[in-house]
Image (tube, rainbow, N blue to C red):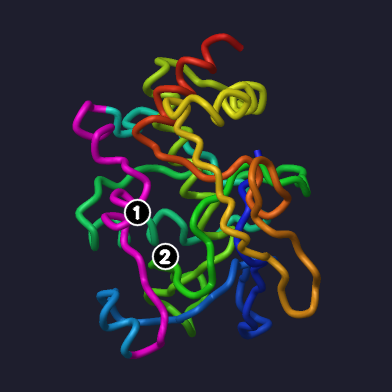
Amino acid sequence: MTVTATAPGHGSAVPHTAARPAVAGHPLVRAVGSPLSIEECRAKWKIACYTPLQYREAYDLNPLYRAGITGKGRTIVIVDSFGSPTVQHDLDVYSRQFGIPSTQVQVVKSARRGTPDISMAAAVDGGAWIYSSYDPSATGWDVSGGTSESSPLFSGIVALADQAAGRRLGDIHEALYRLYGRSAYDRSTGIVDVNDGTDNSYQGVTGYAAVNGYDMATGVGTLDAARFVPALAREGRRG
């Protein structure tokens, strides 16, 4: 599953003696003492800084949570090229900050694909608050965009669909594209076409525009989780 971002990410330099990821998304802010509000971020850095509560609203997750679909008991595997030695500590700090029960995270490697399937928030005019401490010279709260923002978002959505289905859905490609095949006339699929003409060209590299239907900028589009999660759970059971 490839989750596309609205702009490619680039890592930032850290001291050569420090452990660091091969790709770190698009860092917008580094090593802040504590998360700030969107208003404070816009005043200080001219960007928006998003918290988990804001993503819940943006992707219509609250109806699922009220129904008990929270991802409890599911495993999210973060596919990355870097196994941070501080990832559990950082997750615990993050969870305490936002009042979220902490959990265990497994990070693995995987082959990559160059074809986008679905689009989640990743524009670099704003980003998600994260906490990291693997680089001792830059411990604290960061704001990151790119695929380092969008991929964890979608992995959480799939975990919710696993719980709704009562089992691991595994490879969801066929189910996703069956839903996409109906999405033009069936809103219950939860797939939301992105067709506003947004262009993902970046730093002189010509990209693609978001148009009606599938495109190389946003894949099949984005999602309304309250509809998409139960639809994917139903469709995935057929696989």
Q: Position of residue 219 (x, y in %)?
A: 66, 45
Q: Nearer the viewer, mark 1 or mark 2?
A: 1
Q: Magenta residues, as a range?
A: 44-68
Q: Which mark is residue 231?
A: none
Asked if the stretch drawn in magenta spans residue 83, the answer is no
Question: CB atoms at circles 1 and 2 under 8 Å apart?
Answer: yes
Question: Image check: 209 left or right of 188?
Answer: right
Secondary structure beneath label 2 = strand
The answer to whether residue 202 is above or below residue 71 is below
At label 1, which amino acid type do we have?
Tyr
Quadrant of the rendering where the N terminus is positioned? top right
The single residue placed furthest to the bottom in the displayed view is: 44
Q: At 39% across and 31% down in the image, what residue appears?
A: 160
Reply above or below: 36 against 225: below
Left or right of 174, for residue 65: left
**Residue 171 seen from this side:** no
- Residue 228 on image: x %, y %: 44, 31
Q: Is residue 194 left or right of residue 205?
A: left
Judge whether residue 158 can be spotted in this image: yes
How dense is the environment of label 2, judged by Cα within 10 Å: few (below 14), some, or many (20 and up)?
many
Most foreground residue, 237 or 89: 237
Q: Quadrant of the C terminus?
A: top right
Give the camera-side residue of 191 and 23: 191
Mark 1 or 2, nearer chain start: 1
Question: Residue 157, position in %: x, y?
Answer: 44, 38
Residue holding disc 1: 55
Task: Give the residue drawn at x 50%, y 21%.
Answer: 168
Q: Is residue 89 left or right of residue 21?
A: left
Per the image, the residue denoted by label 2 is: 128
The residue drawn where x is 80% and y is 69% is 206
Type of amino acid at the residue the image marks with label 2 = Ala
- Crowd class of label 1 (few under 14; some 14 to 19; many from 20; radius 10 Å): some
